[in-house]
Image (cartoon, rainbow, N blue to C red):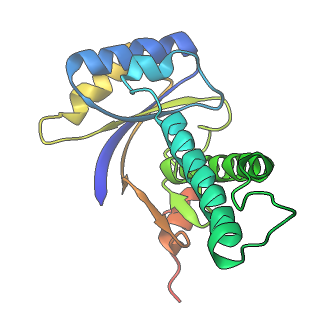
Amino acid sequence: MIKNFVVGCFKEEADTFKAVEQVRATGYKLHDVYTPFPIHGLDEAMGLRGTSLHTAGFLYGLLGTLTALLGMSYVTVMSWPLNFDGKPHFPLPAFIPITFELTVLFSSVGMVLTFCWLNQIMPGVKKHIFHPRQTDDYMVMVIEVTPKTRPDEVVKMLEGLNAVEITQQRAEAGWWFGKFSKREKYEEAGLSSVPVG
């Protein structure tokens, strides 16, 4: 979905924190803040809730444990029961190493895939880049323009908060698979027109 955004760039962490607090206090919709390095406390300032990735890891681990125990139980008890010198068909202590390994495998792989899905960083995923220096040395704050938002007021507010660069953009809000279009490639290169053909 194409939406309108006001993009403010900051060079200092303190200015970024002040701007985030001001945007939240005035009720504007904060789309995201892109930084070239992690900033401690920014997620709390933005009002983001804590991650549930550890819960997903526990559930994936539980699935691995059940897969191991049920799989080995099926093989040794139902499918191909063998009598090893009177030992039980369900020797739980012998199942522990394989159960542990499958628990760790399911949990780690599941958490990595969930992390990639939630952060939209899978292979082939494309997202709009709001500023080319957002991974270099700028903290880029993106404010979504809603029907209640007046872009000119947002621009004035950002100017008063030491923003070094302010732009208004119309862009895809989400992510998509595939390639960037020709128009986006030329716009990112700073060219105003797309050659025909």
Farthest residue toward the right? 85
Residue 158 picture quarter = top left
* Image position, residue 61 (x, y; %): 60, 46
* Image position, residue 173 (x, y; %): 36, 53
**Residue placed at 47% from the left, 32% from the top?**
51
**Residue placed at 21% from the left, 23% from the top?**
27
Q: 14 above or below 35? A: above
Asked if one can make out residue 115 in the rendered structure from this viewpoint, the answer is no
Q: Quadrant of the N terminus?
A: bottom left
Foreground of the two, 113 or 78: 78
Foreground of the two, 113 or 70: 70
Q: 185 above or below 170? A: below
Residue 179 appears left or right of 103: left
Farthest residue toward the front? 86
Residue 8 appears left or right of 58: left
Q: Give the mark count.
A: 0
Residue 139 appears left or right of 30: right
**Residue placed at 42% from the left, 36% from the top?**
32
* Image position, residue 107 (x, y; %): 63, 47
Farthest residue toward the bottom? 197
Foreground of the two, 7 or 191: 7
Q: 166 above or below 95? A: above
Asked if one can make out residue 124 in the rendered structure from this viewpoint, the answer is yes
* Image position, residue 48 (x, y; %): 39, 27
